[in-house]
Amino acid sequence: MTLNLLLKLLVAIVIVLSPIHKKSFASWQTPYGYANFGFKAITANHQKYNDRNLYGSLTKLGLTLEKEQPSHRICLNQSFAIQKAGNELAECEDIWEYAEHDGTIAIALSDGATESSFAREWAQKLVTTFVNQDNRISLHNDLTTWLLGLQTIWQKWLSQQNLSWFAKRKAEQGAFATFLSLEISSNLQWISLAVGDSCLFVVRDCTLQESFPLHNSQEFNNRPRLVSSYAQLTNINTLKALGHAQIGDRFYLTTDAIACWIFKQLEASLNPWVKLEQINSQDTFVRWVSELRDRHEIVNDDTTLLCLEIQDASKIL
């Protein structure tokens, strides 16, 4: 070995063993050894390299990550209605509407007051306007937040109708209807608004959890609270109920005839839920209501039964 080469080798050894370079390597060390010395640099740039941004980058590249599947599904199991005996179906003044907005289910039911003009049309306007609102879930809302605007639209529509002087005079007295709504969000929080005697029943394991807005059969009469189409006649008291649902819960929305029957069954220590669960078609519903009317167990009135059920998504084929 030449002297020149030997000197170069000694210089290299001295440099490697010097305290300066030991300190430099020590500053790179992590609990996981030298091989991980780049960790600090990545951590310092976490805003650039964090998981969220990585997912965003995948999305930009056209890659879709599998979303977590919901644990439940909200199903409209029953939606049956029948008119008063002796009337045509087109004369039924029980009207309901259903919609879904970003995972929130909205359903509304209204019973038009027969004594007023255009009660059926007014009930239709109420439920359609409500379920098509943009604000969900309406914990801060009541009917008055959108009712005045709806009444203005109604008056304009009414002015365009070709009515006799007598019909016009009666129509100007206003149209009236009950109102009941239910909204269930994707996290199973629910809220209900009500005016009148259409009722909500929350049932869990065939046991009543809550009835709203009425609580017994004695509360029904011929003068329920109503929502008016006439602004100066509007003096409504909107009632509100809310809660959190569980998988398996059922929400029954009914107009007064069935609601009163349900309360009477409960007051007689009978279980109405088993019977209601067995009604699986319009024909079955019509026969059942007709039998109740014949036995004078239910009044001869427009009659509607709706049912939403929270189902376990894993058990749905």
Image: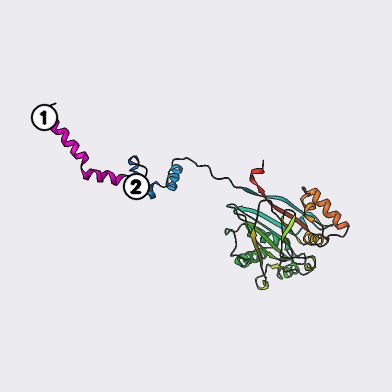
Most frequent secondary structure within the magenta stretch: helix
The quarter of the image holding the N terminus is top left
Q: Nearer the viewer, residue 163 or 198?
A: 198
* 10 is within the stretch colored magenta: yes
Q: Are marks 1 and 2 in contact (CB under 8 Å)?
A: no
Q: Which residue is mark 2?
A: 40
- Where is residue 120? Give x, y as percent: 73, 60
- Does the image show residue 40? yes
* Apparent side of residue 209 relative to residue 45 in the rendered image (left or right): right
Give above or below for 230 relative to 61. below
How many marks are shown on the rendered structure?
2
* Apparent side of residue 33 relative to residue 192 in the rendered image (left or right): left
Residue projecting furthest to the left? 3
SS at mark 1?
Answer: helix
Among the 4 quarters of the image, the one containing residue 129: bottom right
Among the 4 quarters of the image, the one containing residue 91: bottom right
Label 1 or label 2, whichever comes before in sequence order: 1
SS at mark 2?
Answer: helix
Among the 4 quarters of the image, the one containing residue 172: bottom right
- Magenta span of residues: 1-28
Q: Which residue is mark 1?
A: 3
Amino acid carrying mark 2 in the image: Lys
Amino acid carrying mark 1 in the image: Leu
